Image (cartoon, rainbow, N blue to C red):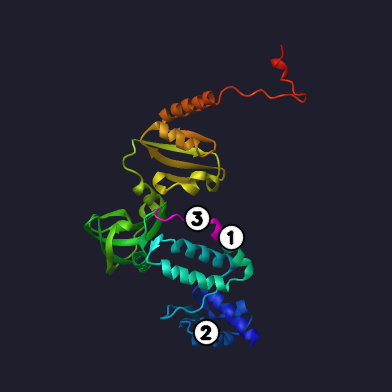
Amino acid sequence: MVRTSARLLGLLSLFQSQPDWQGRELAQRLGVTTRTVRRDVDRLRDLGYPIDSTSGTAGGYRLGVGGALPPLLLGDEEAVAVAVGLRAAAAGWVSGVEEPSLRALGKIEQLLPSRLRHRVAGLGSALLLLPGQCPTVDAGLLAALAAACRAHEGVRLRYGGEPCRVEPYRLVRGGRDWYLLAFDLDRDEWRAFRVDRIDGGVQPGARFSPRPEPGGDAAAFVSDAIAPSSWLYRSTILFLAPLETVTVARTASPAAGRLKPRDATSCLHHTGAETLEALAVQAALTGIDFEVLDPSELREHVRALGERLVRAAGPPSVSAGPGGAADASMRG
């Protein structure tokens, strides 16, 4: 019985890692016969897991969507990620899920082993989520848009008081805001809609065949679309560090520009500002060596900023020698 229970958990873990499996693949993974796999699948069905049989020469199984949520198997890192995510949701970043998030968090923390409970508690005590620091979006609206993206189903919505018929593709978190990448059928163009500015809910439309993403890079399109149109100056900065170590990549909103890797040791930042001075300061504050690729006028502002900072720092201090005397060059 213990061996059967362990095998069922292993089978369930495989189904949750990917939904479709051939019977012989499952048998090889579990070290059993295909007949045993069939029996174990029937046991999981009796427990409420919607597992469908697939036809074909080899035959197989698919984990479907049921009317109730069966138990889930989470790894250590997954459990910690879920708990931390629920804490953020309970802080009100997504409206309408605060109380359910707290209830779910309580259930998960009760079931966590002590080693993970301490990790979650440590993160929770160090994590400070200030209310009102970012716009909240309706959880039902996010769920409806995500479902439409997944099913390739068009939606009708109102944006800024204007009715729109769109084909939704992706939900993108940009800094403090959620954006919907969609093709606007009325305008015949791609757009990035800020979700918190969608008036009310959405109405389902007709299913559609997916289009190629704009420019082949959805993230770049959204970043460019939400960049301030009031920028008077745009620049390209070469940071002499890998993308994952550049501070602006971890802290700045996509509306502040777009970062992309150039090679293993450097990356490019396409950004803008209302003044060249602001661009120079933004690049300098990253604390990372950089080069200005364009515009050429920005190089002069960076050079002037550096000279001004050197003057502000004053002359270097004179260090004392081992005996407390000043440097020999300063002696009379």
Residue 303 x %, y %: 48, 26
N-terminal of the pair, mark 2 or mark 1, is 2
Residue indicated by mark 1: 122
Q: Quadrant of residue 144?
A: bottom left
Q: Nearer the viewer, residue 60 or 102?
A: 102
Left or right: 329 in relation to 10: right
For mark 1, does the 10 Å Cα neighbourhood hold few (<14), some (14 to 19), or many (20 or more) residues? few
Label disc, if present, on residue 44 of the rendered structure: 2
For mark 2, does the 10 Å Cα neighbourhood hold few (<14), some (14 to 19), or many (20 or more) residues? some
Q: Dividing the image into 4 quarters, which one contains the C terminus?
A: top right
Question: Image point 46% across, 61% down: which residue?
Answer: 88
Q: Amino acid at mark 1?
A: Gly
Which element carries disc 2, helix, strand or loop? helix
Report how far apart the C-alphas of labels 2 and 1 lie in the structure: 36 Å
Question: Image point 50% across, 80% down: which residue?
Answer: 60
Question: Image point 65% across, 84% down: which residue?
Answer: 3
For mark 3, does the 10 Å Cα neighbourhood hold few (<14), some (14 to 19), or many (20 or more) residues? few
- Rendered position, 302 above or below 326: below
Left or right: 47 in relation to 270: right
Q: Would you say the magenta stretch is mainly helix, strand or loop?
A: loop
Q: Nearer the viewer, residue 243 or 134?
A: 134
N-terminal of the pair, mark 2 or mark 3, is 2
Question: Image point 41% across, 28% down: which residue?
Answer: 297
Which element carries disc 3, helix, strand or loop? loop
Residue indicated by mark 3: 128
Query: For the magenta stretch, what is the residue range?
Result: 123-132
